Image (cartoon, rainbow, N blue to C red):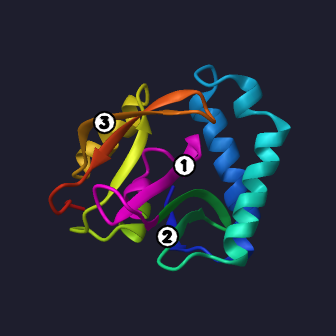
Amino acid sequence: MNATIRLANRSDAEAIADVHNRSRAEAYRGLIADDILLGEDHTYALAQEWKDFFTQPAEGTRVAVAEVGSQIVGFAYAHPAVGPAAIELHNLYMLEKAKGTGAAAMLLDAVIEPGEPAFLWVAEWNERAQAFYRKHGFEFDGAQDFHEGDQITCLLYTSPSPRDS
């Protein structure tokens, strides 16, 4: 499966919301309560957030999508932030069928330049994602935060030195 990476645009909002919801369900089913993960309110809220985002994107935000054919199978979103680095990777989600294809690494590079210090939060039990981020120059810095919306503990990963692609 060869994926094409491109910057996202307003017409991608609905597809990004769909991938966001589906990939979370695939990855977190049984780890996050179904009423939070699959609830209609949550699904609608994500769709509305992406529609709103593309209506008025904040300055400096970066969103890229991975496509196979004309279908979006993953996306990444980074934005300027106040924290241990000037850029936060806020989302990087792939549909299960696209995992292991190399598209996630290409998405990461599309929203965070190799060598650009950045940070992200990852679920404490998501060992696959933690291994991926370590492979790409991020390190757990010891900080944890409880994410009220999903009822999960997240770990802070930073790229204190230029990350390799």
Above or below for 153 versus 87: above
**Residue 148 relative to residue 129: left or right:** right
Element type at marker 3? strand
Q: Which residue is mark 3?
A: 143
* Mark closer to the chain start, 2 or 1: 2
Residue range (magenta): 79-106
**Residue 130 relative to residue 159: left or right:** right
Q: 72 or 60, which is in the foreground? A: 60
Q: Is residue 15 magenta?
A: no
**Residue 67 relative to residue 164: left or right:** right
Disc 2 versus disc 1: distance between alpha carbons? 12 Å
**Residue 38 relative to residue 151: left or right:** right
Residue shown at 24% from the left, 46% from the top: 135
Please state which of the two labelled residues, at mark 3 or mark 2, is closer to the viewer: 3
Residue shown at 37% from the left, 65% from the top: 87
**Mark 2 and mark 1 residues within 8 Å of each other at the beta carbon:** no
* Mark closer to the chain start, 3 or 1: 1
Q: Which residue is mark 2?
A: 5
Above or below for 100 versus 30: below
Is residue 79 visible in the rendered image? The answer is yes
Please state which of the two labelled residues, at mark 3 or mark 1, is closer to the viewer: 3
* Mark closer to the chain start, 3 or 2: 2
Q: Position of residue 11 (x, y in %)?
A: 74, 75
Residue 94 is labelled as 1
